[in-house]
Image: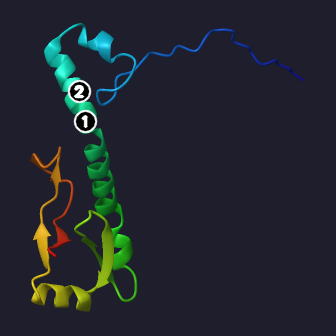
Amino acid sequence: VIVTTPLVSHAAVVQNPSCVSGEGQACDELADGNDYIKSLQRKSAANREAYAKENLSAYQMKNYPDYFAALNPPRYLVKKLDGSFAAYTQDEIAEFSKNGKIRMETPKAMGGKVTDLTQKPIMVMVE
């Protein structure tokens, strides 16, 4: 019988300060006095919430449409005016389309600057 004892490490955990989306302890150090870098960090911090919403929307549109399409009857995700999503049947979609209340949209990324080719076109409520 071989008995071993666990090795105990007394080393400190290395933690580096970070600068994420223009916020964090390391931002000033990383900017190193450069006003342009500081302005980019401020801009990034200001857009942080918008980018988080954009990422959540992209996640939902990449992961949930197949689930709703598999229901009986199938349902399809439609982005509402407030940015949330609702699932509608094909008949409801047809009625919205007939009344001009829905349109197709190509998803954008980076605050609307770039077309997000990782997503399929989505249906969006007009009014």
In the displayed structure, does residue 107 sit left or right of residue 77? left
Residue 95 left/right relative to 75: left
Q: How many marks?
A: 2
Q: Residues within 10 Å of mark 2 (few under 14, many from 20)?
A: some
The residue under label 1 is: 46
Q: Which residue is found at the position 26% from the left and 46% from the top?
A: 50
3D distance between C-alphas at marks 2 and 1: 6 Å
Tell me, what colour scheme is on the image?
rainbow
On-image quarter of the C terminus: bottom left
Instruction: Classify mark 1: helix, strand or loop.
Output: helix
Task: State the residue in front, 113 or 68.
Answer: 113
Which residue is disc 2 drawn over?
Answer: 42
Say above or below: 82 vs 22. Answer: below
Could you say which is closer to the camera, residue 70 or residue 77? 77
Q: Quadrant of residue 76?
A: bottom left
**Marks 2,1: beta carbons within 8 A:** yes
Question: What residue type is disc 1 on?
Answer: Ala
The quadrant the N terminus occupies is top right
The secondary structure type at the circle numbered 2 is: helix
Q: From what the image shows, is residue 30 above or below residue 52?
A: above
Could you say which is closer to the camera, residue 4 or residue 91?
Answer: 91
Identity of the residue drawn at 29% across and 62% down: 61
Direction right: furthest residue: 1
Q: Amino acid at mark 2?
A: Arg
Return the x and y of residue 52 as percentages of the image width and height: 31, 46
